[in-house]
């Protein structure tokens, strides 16, 4: 797919984003100008600031920008992932049924909480060096952080939180248990590495071909148990034999809040606590 001949929709979910949403939107416009056309659709919910007022103002000045507010979802949904899934399903509905988006070829899903501070034209274009993909997920300079959304047969085949809960039954040290189930899986992936085929991922930014949204949906829980909404969505794509990859040069972020336990201080703390626990056993 040639990005210069493709119509792009940028979408994502927002909440309490009044401080930075205008900047985020302006930056996304600046780095995606090379697409044939660009539209932006944001889904808002549960904001307690003036996010909606700012979005209305942006919409009044930009014909290619739109947003929908779903109001207060906290009263309707127990789990945060269910609320996010509800918002994501709203853009799925718009993509697949609104004539405004009938000519869209590609969808760029982004987080809008300052995570994409290294996203650039160069990193976006790197996704088009290969052709045989249906979805491409971002990588981070410091380490790939989104283990919750990640599914890969060797790297992270299951929900790390299930493993965490199992470890908690037998080792009463939450710090160590988190390290072994989540933080230890945050790999540094060099930008010149081969693409990594996955069953699911996200990492704050992802390209999907439009066909991925038809007859598909997000879910944030199954049988009363919270799950990652991206995993549910991507699972359907894998059942349809779609090709999903992490593109190592699709850099969107560097060190961020998700990496805090990968710092030198936390590594020393990990070693200290590990030795203390080993000593106790002996």
Image (cartoon, grey):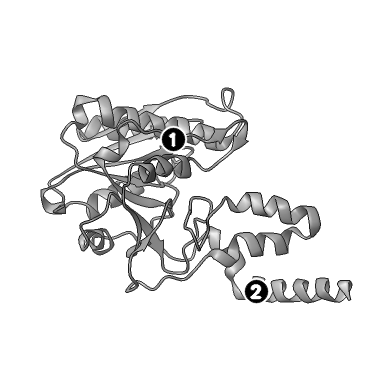
Q: Which of marks 2 and 1 is in front?
A: 1
- Residue 76 position (above or below residue 123): above
Dot 1 crowding, Cα within 10 Å, few <14, some 14–19, many 20+: many
- What residue is rendered at 39% in x and 55% in y? 116
Visible in this render: residue 172?
Answer: no
The answer to whether 280 appears left or right of 212 in the picture is right
- Residue 279 position (above or below residue 64): below
Dot 2 crowding, Cα within 10 Å, few <14, some 14–19, many 20+: few
Quadrant housing residue 197: bottom left
Label 1 sits on residue: 218
Element under label 2?
helix
The spot of residue 166 in percent (x, y) is 72, 52
The answer to whether 247 appears left or right of 227 in the picture is left
- What residue is rendered at 47% in x and 24% in y? 71
Label 2 sits on residue: 267
The answer to whether 278 appears left or right of 93 in the picture is right
The spot of residue 248 in percent (x, y) is 35, 66
- What residue is rendered at 25% in x and 38% in y? 211
In this orientation, which residue lies closer to the viewer: 193 or 108?
Answer: 193
In this orientation, which residue lies closer to the viewer: 26 or 193?
Answer: 193
The spot of residue 24 in percent (x, y) is 35, 48
The spot of residue 156 in percent (x, y) is 53, 58
- Residue 206 position (above or below residue 214): below
First in sequence: mark 2 vs mark 1: 1
In this orientation, which residue lies closer to the viewer: 153 or 274?
Answer: 153
Q: How many labels does the image show?
A: 2
- What residue is rendered at 51% in x and 32% in y? 83
């Amino acid at each position: 797919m040639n990005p210069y001949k493709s119509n792009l929709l940028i979408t994502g979910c927002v909440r309490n984003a009044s401080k930075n949403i205008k900047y985020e939107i302006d930056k996304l416009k600046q780095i995606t100008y090379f697409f044939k056309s660009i539209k932006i659709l944001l889904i808002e919910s549960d904001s307690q600031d003036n996010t909606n007022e700012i979005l209305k103002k942006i919409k009044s000045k930009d014909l290619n920008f739109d947003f929908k507010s779903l109001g207060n979802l906290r009263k309707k949904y127990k789990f945060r992932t269910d609320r996010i899934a509800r918002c994501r399903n709203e853009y799925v509905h718009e993509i697949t049924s609104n004539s405004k988006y009938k000519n869209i070829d590609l969808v760029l899903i982004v987080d809008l909480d300052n995570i994409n501070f290294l996203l650039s034209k160069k990193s976006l274009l790197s996704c088009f060096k290969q052709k045989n993909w249906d979805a491409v997920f971002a990588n981070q300079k410091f380490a790939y952080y989104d283990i919750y959304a990640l599914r890969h047969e060797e790297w992270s085949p299951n929900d790390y939180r299930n493993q965490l809960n199992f470890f908690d039954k037998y080792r009463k040290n939450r710090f160590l248990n988190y390290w072994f189930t989540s933080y230890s899986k945050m790999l540094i992936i060099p930008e010149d590495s081969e693409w990594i085929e996955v069953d699911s991922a996200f990492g704050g930014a992802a390209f999907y071909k439009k066909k991925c949204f038809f007859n598909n949906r997000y879910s944030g829980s199954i049988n009363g148990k919270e799950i990652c909404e991206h995993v549910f969505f991507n699972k359907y794509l894998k059942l349809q034999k779609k090709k999903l990859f992490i593109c190592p040069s699709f850099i969107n972020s560097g060190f961020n809040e998700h990496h805090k336990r990968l710092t030198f201080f936390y590594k020393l703390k990990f070693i200290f606590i590990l030795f203390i626990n080993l000593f106790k056993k002996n």
